[in-house]
Image (spheres, rainbow, N blue to C red):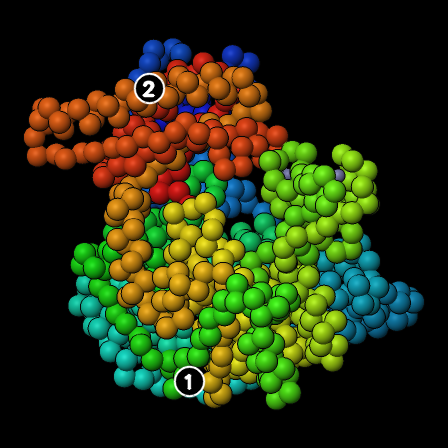
Amino acid sequence: MYADIIIDISVENLDRTFQYHIPENFEDSVTVGSKVNIPFGKGNRKITGYVVGISDEAKIDVTKIKDIDSVCIKDISIEDRMIELAFWMKEHFASTTNEALKCVLPVKRAVRSKVEKIILPAVSKDVLGVELDLAVRKHYTAKERFLRELISEYDDGLKYSLITEKLNILPATISSIERKGLIKVESKTVFRNTLGKAADDAEADNDAIVLNDEQKKISDSITEDLKNGIKGKYLIHGITGSGKTEVYLSVIDEVIKQGKSVIMLIPEIALTYQTVKRFYKRFGDGISVINSRLSAGERYDQYLRAKNGDTRIVIGPRSAIFSPFDNLGLIIIDEEHEGSYKSENSPKYDTREVAFHRAEKEDAAVILGSATPSLTSYLLSKEGRIRLFELKQRAGGAELPAVHIVDLKEELKQKNRSIFSRKLRELMEDRLLKGEQIMLFINRRGHSGFVNCRNCGTVMKCPHCDVSLTFHNPGKLICHYCGFEKEMTVNCPECGSPYIGTFGTGTQKIEEMLNREYPDARVLRMDYDTTRAKESYDEILSKFSNREADILVGTQMIVKGHDFHNVTLVGIILADMSLYQEDYRSAEKTFQLLSQAAGRAGRGKRSGDVVIQTYNPGHYAIEAAAVHDYGRFYDEEIAFRRLMKYPPAWSMLKVMLCSENEPELLKETERVNMFLKKETEHINNCVNNGKITGTEREIKLFGPSKAGIYRINDIYRIIFYLKGNDYDMLTEIKDKLMTLPVEHKDVSMQFDFNPY
Ligand code: ADP
Ligand code: ZN
Ligand code: ZN
C-alpha cells in the first residue's frame, strides 16, 4: 500500500503530495489523516507529514518510493472530513494545502494534559494501623505523618501534591511505601477549566426568561424544521437587545435533545464574561469556551473534549468553526457582520462560507444573527437562499434611544473648538448629576493622530512603514502597523524647531480631557493598550458594570455586545473616522458601528440618548443609523455596490505581490500584469464573439497599483484587483497564476477573495 503525503512545511513549491510506501507493520495504523515521520529529500532528512490519500498503485517507479519511518500515534490524526474541508478551502480561498491543513487542525501538537495524582490505600485500615505503630516506634516521622493522613482519608485517598507540598513528605518516601504494596498511586487527567469566573458566578442569579412572541415564533420555526429533519440556513435580523441570544439558547436546547453538537461563534471581542455566564447557566459543564488567550495545553484539552464528545457546545471566535465534532447539528454565527469572521492569514477564509460548506457536508443547520446584517448575508436572504427572520422590538420592552446628530461645522461656527459638542456636554453633565453611566467612543487608540512640526511641516513617520506615528502618553511615538516605538521628539529632526504639534484625537486624549473638565467623574479607558494583559479586558468591563466608573472611553471594543443597564448616554466623538477609509465597505462599517454604539444606550428601564458628532450629517449611513432604519441603508448601499460592481453584487479577487526587493517586485509586477491582461481580455472577448453561448462572463482588471500603504515593515506591496460576475472564473485565474513559473524568488504572491 502507498500513501499520498503532504509535507508539514509551508513552502509553496512543495505544495503537492509525495508518495510513500506503507511498511506492512504499519498498514493498520496508517489511515487518511495520520501524521507520519518520513525521510525527505536527497539527505533523507526526517520530517513529518499528513496522509491525505491511500492507494495500492504506485504513481512512480516503485524502486524510487521510500518507506514511511513511523506513525506519530500521540499526535491527533485529522479526520477525513476535516481533510476534505482543508482541500476545499485551499481551492476556494487560495492557500497552500499545508496552510489549509494547519487551519482546520487548530492544535498541531499534542500537549500533555494536566494530570493529577491520587494516593489510595491498597490494604485494609488495620494493616495500615500496624504500619503506623511500627513507624512511631522507629521514629520514622515522615512516614508516621503520612500514614495518619491516609488512615483519616481512607475512603477518598490523598492528593499527591498535597502530600509533597503541605506535609513535606518526599516523593522517595511515598515510592518506598508504594513498593511495599501499602498504597497505589493513580493518575487522573484533569481538564483545564477555561470558563473561569463566569462558571463560579453563574448560579448566583437564575431568573428564567420566557421568550416573547417574536422570539418564540422564530425559535418554533427553526426547531420545527429540525424536528422534521430539515437543515436550513437562517438569518435573524434583530435590533440590538431584541433577545437574539435567548433564541439561540432555545434552539440549542432542541439540538442537544436530538443528541447533536453545536458550534456557537461569537466574535472574540463580544465573548465576555456576561455572555459565557448565560451559556453556562443554561448548559453547565457541557459547554467549552475557546479564545485566543488560551494556552496550548488549554486549547488541546478543549479539542479533546469536543472530539471525545465530553462537550456538546463549543463557544468561540472564528477558529471554533473547526471544532472536531462527529455529530454536528447546528452552527450559529452571532454578529455575523463582524470583520473578524474573515481570516487575515492564508487561507483568508470567510467563516460564513466555511460554515455553509461544513453544514452541507455534515447535514447541520446554520443560523446567522445580527442587528446590522452584512450586505452579503442580507442579499442572500433577499434572493431566498437564506430564510430571514426579524426581531423588531427590544426584549423586556426597553426603548430605542433617541439619536442626535451634531454637525461639527456648526459647532465651530458657534466658536466651540472643544472635542465635545454643546449637546454632548449638556447630556454628559445631566447624566453625571443623575449618577447614570456614559460611554464615549472614538475609533483611534493612543493620544493623537499624527505629530508634525509647525515650522516646516515635517510629519513624524515610521522608518519601516509609509505611515505617520501616533503620539501615546507618556511621551511615546508608536507605529500602529509594525509596533515601532520611539521617544517623542522635542525638536524637529528636519529644522530643529521646538514647535512640535499633535493633531487629531485618540482615546488617551479624551480620557485626559475628561479628567480635566470633570475632575469628579471616574473614567475608565478600554483599548488595545489597556487590555493587553490576560484578564484586564474582563476587569475593565466588570468594573464598569459594577458602577465603579461613570464614563467608559474606548475604541470599538466597547461597542460590541455588552449589556450595561445603567448606561443612558453614548457619545460618538467623530463618526467620520470610519467613513473615509479607503474601503468599499466603509459606509457599511460606519452604519454598523453607529448602530452598535447606539445599541449600548438605554438597555435598562430608563431610555437613553446617543450623540453622533460628524462633519457629514447628511450621509446616508449616518442618517439611517440615527433613525434605526436598516432597510433604508441597505437599499442605498446595495445600489452603490451594483453600480460599482463591488461585492456582494460581483465577486472580487485581490492579488498582492510583496517583496523587500523593490526592483524585483516591479519586474514581477510587469510580468503578472501582462498575464492578467491577456487572461481578462480573453474572457471578455469570448463573450463578445459569442464563442461561448449562454455565458455572460465578464471580468475587469484594476491595477497594478501601490497598496494604500506601499511599505509596511520594510516590505513593498503591489496590488491588482479583479472584479468578475462569477466567483469560479476568479478561482480559475488564481489557479493559473499559481502555476506561473517563478522568476523572481524574492517576490511572494497572495490572494484574497472578496477582500476586506
Ligand atoms: P441580543 O442578543 O439581541 O442583543 P439579548 O439576548 O442579549 O439580545 O437580550 C437583551 C436583554 O434582554 C438581555 O438582558 C436579556 O436577558 C433580555 N431578554 C431577552 N429576552 C427576553 C425576554 N423574552 N423577556 C425578558 N427579557 C429578555
Ligand atoms: Zn521642522
Ligand atoms: Zn511601522
| Secondary structure at numbered mark 2 | helix
Please name the residue that numbered disc 1 is placed on. Answer: 398
- Please tell me how crowded label 2 is: few (under 14), some (14-19), or many (20+) other residues with Cα within 10 Å: some
Residue kind at label 1, given as amino acid type: Ala
* Picture quadrant of residue 545: bottom right
- Residue 263 placed where, x, y %? 39, 60
Q: Earlier along the polypeptide chain: callout 1 or callout 2?
A: 1
Taking the spot 31% from the left edge, 56% from the top edge, the residue there is: 637
According to the picture, the residue beneath numbered tag 2 turns out to be 675
Kindly state the secondary structure of the residue where label 1 is placed.
loop
The answer to whether any part of residue 626 appears in the image is yes
Q: Residue 546 got which mark?
A: none
Residue nearest the observer in this picture, 417 or 564: 417
Front in this rendered view, residue 472 or 108: 472
In this rendering, the answer to whether 14 lies above or below 554 is above
Residue drawn 55% across the image and 54% down it: 292
Q: How far is disc 1 from disc 2 in space, using C-alphas?
A: 58 Å
State the image coordinates of residue 734 (x, y, percent, origin top left): 33, 29
Give the residue displayed 57% in from the left and 29% down from the top: 715
Residue 307 location, x and y as percent?
43, 54
The amino acid type found where label 2 is placed reads Phe
